Image (cartoon, rainbow, N blue to C red):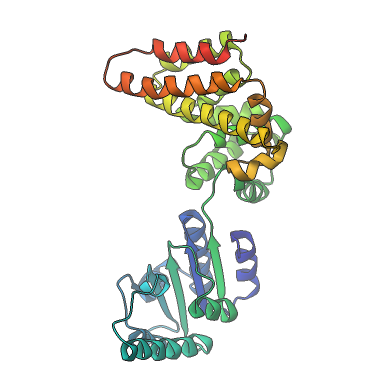
Amino acid sequence: MKFGEFMVKLQQQQDCHLFLLAGEEHYYIDKALKRIMAGLFSHPQDAAESVQKITADIDTDDLIGMIETAPFFADKNVLLLRNTALFKDKAKQDGEKKAAAKDKKMERLLATLADMPPFSYVIFVTGDKADKRRKLYKTIEKYGLVLEAEAVRAWNINDWLQGKLQSMNRELDRDAYAYFQGAVSMMQQISLEFLDREFDKLALFAEERRITKAELVKVFAGLPEVSVFSLMDAISERNSRKALMLLKRQLADGTYFTVILSLLTRHVRQLWQAKTLQAKGIRGKALAKPMELNPFIAEKLGRAAAQFPEAVLKAAMLELIDADYWLKTGQAGEEILEHTVIRLCEKA
């Protein structure tokens, strides 16, 4: 289950003794783990003293023994297993007897997890995506709670955004929402920890319940990746004057040419991809899935791509590939970026 549903179930099933937190998004895993610990212990110090942390591989029979051992100086026996090999692909077995022995040991573990002692709690944490075909996964899903912490990208960030705004008792106006989606789409990697902190700052100085674009810009404008967003928008509009002005401003503000070059190359590649997909009849919000973009951004990109001849996008991409080499080897200056921008914006 996803993060929001997991947190609701966690609140409803306070007597749960078995957990699996799996996936790439550490932000969700950390939040879920903190909530679990808060439900098990009244004070953080109690958790620090009582939780047995296991980071190395452990024999399944040894794990069973730990689960069944009653605590001596505490009322709970909490086992936290991080990145255990139990959820990794099985290695090739050396022989039938060895395979049969391992299967029997796993069956014993599954039986123990299905009938946990009232004093024991087991929390599995893994950065791998959960394999739903495994008996271990199915057992935990049946008798416990499973969090599937899918990595957050621009196309699936709305769940996080709505949850965060709800916790702040705020909402974004239409222009602010459009700006946020565009800004996030420019980020090579999305850090939910960073976004979480920035929205907390936003809540401090935004006076009204509805957050405006101007307020959002104050928070994000300092990020090089996000501040280049306006430049990409100007290129999409094929507004050469505005694009050149924004490019010069970025360079004057100290934005390193490699950041601009990387984002410009990515933008041209996305325009070209949208152009190709639209030629195949894939249009509007339907562009979101093949391009792995938020539907709002994909539709906007599709409209922009329709204004560019394919030959212009191809020539710009080749020029940017050359620019990467020339700039990094010192054989060209920032004027090569200006030339590419002019070429993209030039209308026949």
Q: Is residue 45 above or below residue 337?
A: below
Q: Is 98 left or right of 130, judged from the image as shown? A: left
Q: Is residue 185 above or below residue 238?
A: below
- Give percent across and percent down for residue 60: 36, 84
Q: Is 340 left or right of 57, judged from the image as shown? A: right
Quadrant housing residue 242:
top right
Examine the rendering and report whether any part of residue 207 can be seen. no
Quadrant housing residue 5:
bottom right
Q: Residue at x 71, y 40 (%)?
A: 285
Q: Is 289 left or right of 105, judged from the image as shown? A: right
Q: Number of marks in the image? A: 0
Q: Residue at x 46, y 42 (%)?
A: 189
Q: Is 162 left or right of 131, judged from the image as shown? A: right
Q: Quadrant of the N terminus?
A: bottom right
- Give percent across and percent down for residue 117: 49, 89
Q: Residue at x 54, y 31 (%)?
A: 219
